Amino acid sequence: MRLCFFDFEVMSTVNMVLCIMILAVGCIVYARTKNKVPFHIGVAFGLFAVTHVIAMFGVQCSFVTTVMLIKVFAYLIVLFSLREMYSKN
């Protein structure tokens, strides 16, 4: 009995598309409001999309350190962006 309906590539593709959509929305919001926080969060999700592309090509084992650093950097961007929003209020 198969418990998983999606294979790894489908999930990586869906995640990549969603990350690219968040990147696009972040850029649009920045263009309209000049608020850098949505742009930074969009960039972070753009970096997550890069890691999904690496996974889809099946070379994540060759780039373990690179993928880890990209993800840590992206999480830090989100963290500091949210901190910036909090400190403005």
Image: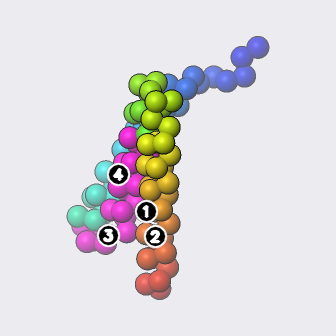
Q: Could you tell me which secondary element the residue under label 3 belongs to?
A: helix
Residue at numbered disc 2: 80
Chain-order first, disc 2 or disc 4: 4
Marks 2, 3: nearer the viewer: 2
Which residue is more in the foreground, 60 or 82? 60
Residue at numbered disc 1: 77
Mark 3 → mark 4, Cα distance in angstroms: 13 Å
Where residue 2 sits, quadrant-wise, is top right
Residue at numbered disc 3: 36
Chain-order first, disc 4 or disc 1: 4
Percent position of residue 88, x then y: 43, 84
Residue at numbered disc 4: 23
Chain-order first, disc 3 or disc 4: 4
Mark 3 → mark 1, Cα distance in angstroms: 11 Å
- Kindly check if marks 2 and 1 are in contact, taking CB atoms under 8 A apart as contact: yes
Span highlighted in magenta in the image: 32-50
Mark 2 → mark 1, Cα distance in angstroms: 5 Å
Q: Amino acid at mark 4?
A: Leu
Chain-order first, disc 2 or disc 3: 3
